[in-house]
Image (spheres, grey):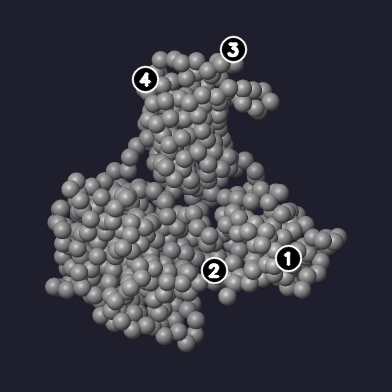
Amino acid sequence: MNTRPQHSDDFQRLNELLPRFVESRLDTNEEQELATILQRSPETQSHYLAYLQLHAELTQAWGAVDENAINHLSERLPGPGPRETRQPERPTETKSTPRISPIFSGGTFGLQNLVAFLVLVIGGLSAGLWVSLSRSGEKGADVALLPHEDSRDDQLADAVPPSPNTLTSDDQPTETQAELFVSGYGKDELLPIAAVVVRLDGNVSPNLAVGRRLTAGTLTLPQGSVQMEFMSGAVVALDGPAELQIHSKEAATLISGAVSAHVPKRAQGFVINAPQAAIVDLGTEFGVRVTPSGVSEVEVLSGEVELSLIGDDGNTLSSQRVQEASRVRVNRDDDELQQVASGGKDLPIISGYDDSALGLSYEYAARVRDDEPLVYWRFEENNAERVRNEMGDAHFARLIGQGESNENIRIENGYVRFQRSDVKRYLMTDDALQSFNENPYSIEFWMKPDDLQHATCLGIFPESRRDPRIFLNVIEIVTDTFMIHEPGAVRFLHRTPPNGEYEIGKNAFSPGMCVPGQWHHVVAVKTFDAMEIHINGQKVRQVVLPEGSVNSEGDFQIVVGQLTANEAWRQFSGAMDEFAVYGRALTPEEIAEHYRLINSID
């Protein structure tokens, strides 16, 4: 049961601040406000702890904490009395066991422990990162590579591969390979992820790889082109030579060069600034070009934008709606917006993700069959309405909601393709898996998401369910939620017994994020006492289940492509292939071998 503060205003404000806090989006004033509310009463402290305890198991899995994060947060959160001065670090202490300086002087709830827990969570969020680099498969597919060839199979996310933002000694920039992206606030700051690189073309420096995550900072591109997806959902293409300052997941400033932006409905309001101009999206695709002389031009390719002329003091001098197929120049001399002719091909092109298939060999399929899954869907028959189970006559899959155009869900090129829609469309087992949850099991598939929108890959439900919220398992891509995780992580949720209450169940989140347009190998394993996530052949997270928990009885069905079969909720957009369900726990060695058989294809 959640304990709520006595003051309703405090409770309401906590519910506004805490989601921003776990996404690292609080500004200095909001951080101080949160600290003040926590100081006000034991009830606010209890409510805060209850919020975090829903996902407290994550703090055990993120590994070492960056001491800079502790110092940074300690300096920002005020106390009711004089703050104790931090003592010099003792010689016997290490960064793996950092000291927490007292931040609050007193309180009946133990606020020092509360802040220590807070800092461990925030510091941990910066520790585990997931590398996902591109490689061409047999049919030209981009496959996320195994980052550590010599990784031990029993290593968990405490020793996950280095971040795309981290250069190895062999990759240090030279004079001809200068670092292209520089964080705007230094290495000691904990910054939220603003965007991820999803595509590179031309002669771009190798230290700016596909999958690299970008925080607030400056991206300088001498040549080539880069396509990024911002965490808000906006897709931005930049052609070199250009310089782009990234402020947040919702805003950037073009200093020089040209940029194009595609902004879906969920990212409406995305802002690109330019010299003396601010362009606010109203649901559109537009481009911005800054000429060598510093003149800004804005062209709307579809929809409309709000274009503002900004004065030297930063305030808006004038503003107008720019409609589709219009190009406007910001005239600095006359302080006006001028309609001009289109520049033609002087704006970057935003590339859609290709539909290349996952490169497969007979050896891969043979190995999966040898491991005897209950379900193995390969999607080999184009435009089929029923997917054959390679392991026998049971557990076929039916395609629901194809529609007249067959665009929302279709089978082509050896995989199933989902497109986000306002109507239901999904795959579903045509018969139940009997007694599925009474023993360990594994779920394995390959996915290539179109974007990082919160999307459910699959859900497992009791055959006799009466409420669409009652489910046993959910595997999904999670971005904007109230939970503590990195944006774009893979979530494995397990509830025994199946239940619709959000407080019941255990989560395992992958460190790092998916990369749109890349194939990822995902395996979720449930044993009697733990749940695991394996990404691209490596175990990246393990969560211990409570002692004495009993696996529930019953028969279960699988829905693939959205959260439930009842509503068009949290739809996955992208491709899936090689879907397998096992009535046992795959070993780390078996999972790594499956990934290697794909990854070894030239």
Does the rendering let one see residue 179?
no
Kindly identify the amino acid type of the residue bearing the numbered disc 3. Asp
Asked which secondary structure carries label 4, the reply is loop
Quarter of the image where one finds residue 334 = top right
Q: Residues within 10 Å of mark 1 (few under 14, many from 20)?
A: some
According to the picture, the residue beneath numbered tag 3 turns out to be: 334
Kindly identify the amino acid type of the residue bearing the numbered disc 2. His
Mark 3 / mark 4, whichever is N-terminal: 3
Mark 1 / mark 4, whichever is N-terminal: 1
Q: Where residue 495 sits in the image (x, y, percent)?
A: 42, 75
Tell me how many marks there are: 4
Q: Which mark is residue 100?
A: 1
According to the picture, the residue beneath numbered tag 4 turns out to be: 344
For marks 1 and 2, give the CA distance. 21 Å
Who is closer to the viewer here, 321 or 379?
321
According to the picture, the residue beneath numbered tag 2 turns out to be: 55
Q: Residues within 10 Å of mark 2 (few under 14, many from 20)?
A: some
Residue pictured at 37% horizontal, 20% vertical: 344
Kindly identify the amino acid type of the residue bearing the numbered disc 1. Ile
Q: Residues within 10 Å of mark 3 (few under 14, many from 20)?
A: few
Residue pictured at 48% horizontal, 69% vertical: 502
For marks 3 and 4, give the CA distance. 25 Å
Mark 3 / mark 2, whichever is N-terminal: 2
Mark 3 or mark 1: which is in front?
Answer: 3
For marks 3 and 2, give the CA distance. 56 Å
Q: Residue placed farthest to the right in the image? A: 82
In the image, is residue 328 above or below residue 120?
above
- Residue 387 lies left or right of residue 574; in this view the side is left
- Residue 142 lies left or right of residue 398; in this view the side is right
Residue pictured at 52% horizontal, 26% vertical: 307
Who is closer to the viewer here, 219 or 465?
465
Quarter of the image where one finds residue 32 = bottom right
